[in-house]
Amino acid sequence: MVLIRWDIFFLLWAGMMVFHLVTYFGSQYLEGEPHTVGGALDERIPFHPGWIYIYSSWFVLLLGVPALLNIVAPELCLKYMLAHSIDQLLSNIIYLIYPTTFERPVPPKKGLTGFVIGTVYGANHRFLNCAPSVHCSVSFLFAFAALAAPMLPLWLRLVIVVWSLAIVASTMLVKQHMVIDAVTALPAAAVCWLLAGLVNFSSLCRKVFLNKNESPTKGFVRRIPMECGRHRLSKMPASPSNACWVCADALLSSARRRK
């Protein structure tokens, strides 16, 4: 098994996050008069300050999901990072064309919960870029990535999916977003995931990240002794046709050496 070397992984992840922050906050200074979103359904959703902790746990998955993918399926890790960046680009184009906002409630003044909500509200003091919600669309990407990784244990995939959906719900319960923000985030995430899927990451990993002329601990990747999860789950004999890109490469190399 091979994973992207961790220093390269963090470099890619940091680049993704810099692009995320610059475009998200930078676009707010280029937008025109915002349109107010919200309706009768939003008024029926109560304000639950305690959900701010679920909302804030988004930042755990923001690093945790791609790190897990790097361990079990580096090609999926790269697909997630590309989908995340496309999502950020698409969302900000929408914000520039149709900026949105709404009036948030007054957060609690005392206690840890009040402090956390005040910090979250204050971090986005201009409070634009509501629909589609990037917080929600990236959460949907977490779920898509987990569902696309059968090499992860089923319980862990379910935890990531349920956790991601809870984060989507929390955006409305802490009044960071309206229902329309979450609803529009789902198709945005789906489109970005499909667009990222047009790139052949298995081939890219072979050509760019896997350098056969280097030692196992050098270059862009590091080899670790691990049975391919896809073979283990399917209980099929490993062959180049059913193997992941790493194992297929190893099997072909072994066949060439035998010849």
Image: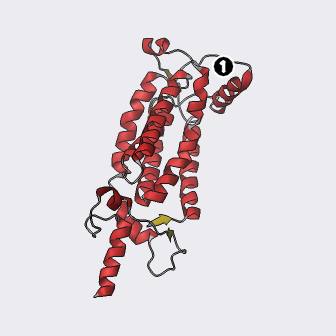
Q: Secondary structure at mark 1?
A: loop
Screen quadrant of the N terminus: bottom left
Q: Position of residue 125 (x, y in %)?
A: 64, 29
Image: 197 above or below 183: below
Image: 6 above or below 34: below
User: Can you name the residue that lies furthest to the front here?
Assistant: 235
Frontmost residue, 101 versus 54: 54
Screen quadrant of the C terminus: bottom left
User: Can you name the residue that lies furthest to the bottom here?
Assistant: 259
Q: Position of residue 50 (x, y in %)?
A: 61, 23
The residue that appears at 54% across and 65% down in the rendered structure is: 5
Number of residue marks: 1
- Looking at the image, residue 249 sits to the left or right of residue 129; the answer is left
- Looking at the image, residue 152 sits to the left or right of residue 115; the answer is left
Q: Position of residue 150 (x, y in %)?
A: 36, 51
Q: Position of residue 248 (x, y in %)?
A: 33, 70
Frontmost residue, 63 versus 72: 72
Residue 168 visible to the viewer: yes
The residue that appears at 50% across and 48% down in the rendered structure is: 65
Is the residue marked by circle 1 packed among few (<14), some (14-19), or many (20+) residues within 10 Å?
some
Identify residue type, mark 1: Pro
The residue that appears at 58% across and 41% down in the rendered structure is: 59
Residue 90 visible to the viewer: no
* Image coloring type: secondary structure
Q: What residue sits right under mark 1 in the picture?
A: 107
Classify residue 183 by image quadrant.
top left
The residue that appears at 46% across and 41% down in the rendered structure is: 160
Classify residue 119 by image quadrant.
top right
